[in-house]
Amino acid sequence: MKTTLFFLFAFLFGLAAAGQKSGLFQPGERWPDNNGVHINAHGGGILFYDGKYYWFGEHKTEGKRGNQAWVGVHCYSSENLYDWKDEGVAFAVSENPESPVTAGCIIERPKVIYNAKTGKFVMWFHLELKGQGYKAAQTGVAVADKPTGPYNFIKALNPNAGVWPVNYAGELKSKKFPENLKEWSDDWIQAVKEGMIVHRDFQKGQMARDMTLYIDEDGKAYHIHASEENLTLHISELTDDYTDFTGKYIRVLPTGHNEAPAVFKRNGKYYMFTSGCTGWAPNAARLLVSDSMMGNWEYIGNPCIGDDKDLTFHSQSTYVLPVQDKKDAYIFMADRWNPENAIDGRYIWLPIQFNEKGNPYLAWKNEWDLSVFDK
Ligand code: GAL
């Protein structure tokens, strides 16, 4: 009897732990946390603080409505990047129906940065108000004293109200655009390129959907977000305490239709992975490069090679993680969404490789470990 029970428990434990093996990344497999539960941190980003990595992401629930925020932002911690400890819900949705972050709103792509001046942890996320689909296109900010939270909601907004982008030609500021242009007609696309939607949203603030954050070496932080109906990325400078916008922002590749931004810097160059806009369905990733965050971002091409390169290996970028204490070690983090059962979305982590020209590229690996960076 005892032996049977032992085998039964061993079998059940084995089932719970099935999925990604310790000491290996296995993109697309289930990734159990310290309790054997698949990590629930989608559209995530990572903060490195005081010797530990903290992974923040969307806490999804089962089924189709699992893409709405019923819980909040989940946090996990790790020292080795393979084994993750559940640190619980770092930012919780509100029970107050009047709150912009009330349960049933949409909270996506949360990112956390540490502000050395204030000693606070600052979380930004894409927020859609409950019952309004993706119309509000706001960004929300919450602050905590500890990396794992609790994060207190400060506000949500459409950024940069009443200010023009810095890279926007003077004469366009007073341009009058024709009304009722047919969407997607050449004239409409030209008008959007020239800032028609920036004009439309000038008073109330610009749209902010898919987003990421980036802190440069000088400590300045940037909020990078899909704006103008997802047609144009905006890069906005944050204030010194990282909890607000300074009003300095640029437009990136107007009408380029980029979302899912993920930024990193190598040898003085800034790189950004993005995706096209096909909702939860994957498409080909894009790679952009610039000499500065607020500079001229140029499109280089699709960074993926090999099978499924035009679907980013069935995933969409969310973050680039620089690995501590290793040179040129960056991990491309992406989501393989599961819109039918959101909680079962998978994580695609791949090492970023560099070609002879120094350009980053991505190749599929069934499994890999951090020793790839030692070669
Ligand atoms: C994707 C976006 C996700 C989510 C989804 C909703 O394009 O990257 O974060 O917003 O659309 O359909």
Image: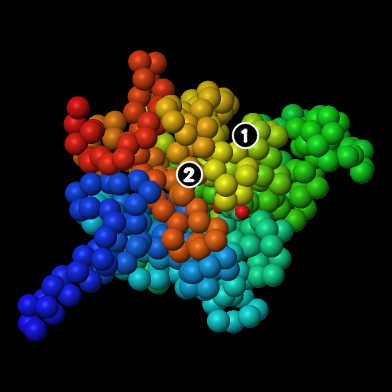
- Residue occupying the point 21% across, 65% down: 14
The front one of 333 and 203 is 333
Secondary structure at badge 2 equals: loop
- Label 1 to label 2, Cα distance in Å? 23 Å
Q: Which residue is mark 2?
A: 315
- Residue occupying the point 31% across, 51% down: 48
Please say whether residue 173 is visible from this viewpoint: no
Secondary structure at badge 1 equals: strand
- Residue occupying the point 22% across, 40% down: 370
Q: Position of residue 237 (x, y in %)?
A: 55, 44
Q: Position of residue 44 (x, y in %)?
A: 43, 54
* Type of amino acid at the residue the image marks with label 1: Val
Q: Establish if 325 lies above or below 57.
A: above
Q: Which residue is mark 1?
A: 252
Classify the position of the N terminus by image quarter: bottom left
Of labels 1 and 2, earlier in sequence is 1
Q: Residues within 10 Å of mark 1 (few under 14, many from 20)?
A: many
Q: Establish if 372 lies above or below 367.
A: above
Q: Residue furthest top?
A: 356
Q: Horizontally, is 47 left or right of 44 in the view?
A: left
* Type of amino acid at the residue the image marks with label 2: Ser
Q: Horizontally, is 195 left or right of 36 in the view?
A: right
- Could you say which quadrant of the image residue 111 lies in? bottom left
- Residue occupying the point 15% across, 70% down: 10
- Could you say which quadrant of the image residue 167 lies in? top right
Classify the position of the C terminus by image quarter: top left
Q: Position of residue 129 (x, y in %)?
A: 65, 67
Q: How is the image coloured?
A: rainbow
Please say whether residue 277 is visible from this viewpoint: yes
